[in-house]
Image: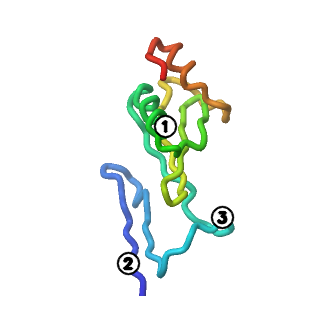
């Protein structure tokens, strides 16, 4: 049989859980034709943290995309198993604008922060 599922809550929230983990017999490569986790996302506290993450992801050859959503600036990368993850910074006071390409260096410059 499978191990029982694990439901992981975030403390002090009304939600029952934020992540449910279910066991599966055997390990297979991801199949894009079936339902599965698309990606996980982590928020950084400062725009400079996002810049530092970009540098490390580039060094690891893991960066696969960058998006400006207006309300957030996002980096997308893949782990060694090919699963996608996102690292994002929430833009204070900004509204969602859809998705457009991210120019992180321009975002750093307009806030007087070091580029690169």
Question: Regarding mark 2 in the picture, which secondary structure is present there?
Answer: loop
Q: Is residue 9 left or right of residue 95?
A: left
Of marks 2 and 3, which one's residue comes earlier in the chain? Answer: 2
The answer to whether mark 2 and mark 1 are in CB contact below 8 A is no
The residue lying at 66 percent from left, 31 percent from top is 101
Residue 72, image x, y percentages = 54, 32
The residue carrying pointer 3 sits among few (fewer than 14), some (14 to 19) or many (20 or more) residues within 10 Å by Cα, namely few
Question: Regarding mark 1 in the picture, which secondary structure is present there?
Answer: strand
The residue lying at 40 percent from left, 60 percent from top is 16
Of marks 3 and 1, which one's residue comes earlier in the chain? Answer: 3
Q: Is residue 81 left or right of residue 68?
A: left
Residue 44, image x, y percentages = 41, 35
- Mark carried by residue 4: 2
Q: For this rendering, which residue is in front, 68 or 11? A: 68
Question: Regarding mark 3 in the picture, which secondary structure is present there?
Answer: loop
**Mark 3 → mark 1, Cα distance in angstroms:** 24 Å
Which picture quadrant has residue 99?
top right
Q: Which residue is mark 3?
A: 32
Q: For this rendering, which residue is in front, 1 or 62? A: 62
Q: Nearer the viewer, mark 2 or mark 3?
A: 3
Q: For this rendering, which residue is in front, 87 or 105? A: 105
Of marks 2 and 1, which one's residue comes earlier in the chain? Answer: 2
**Mark 2 → mark 1, Cα distance in angstroms:** 32 Å
């Amino acid at each position: 049989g499978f191990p029982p599922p694990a439901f992981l809550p975030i403390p002090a929230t009304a939600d029952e859980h934020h992540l449910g983990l279910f066991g599966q017999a055997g390990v297979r490569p991801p199949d894009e034709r079936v339902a599965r986790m698309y990606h996980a996302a982590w928020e950084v506290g400062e725009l400079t943290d996002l810049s530092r993450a970009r540098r490390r992801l580039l060094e690891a050859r893991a960066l696969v995309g960058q998006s400006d959503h207006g309300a957030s600036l996002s980096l997308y990368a893949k782990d060694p198993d090919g699963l996608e993850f996102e690292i994002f910074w929430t833009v204070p006071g900004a509204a969602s604008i859809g998705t457009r390409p991210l120019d992180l260096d321009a975002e750093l410059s307009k806030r007087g922060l070091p580029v690169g």
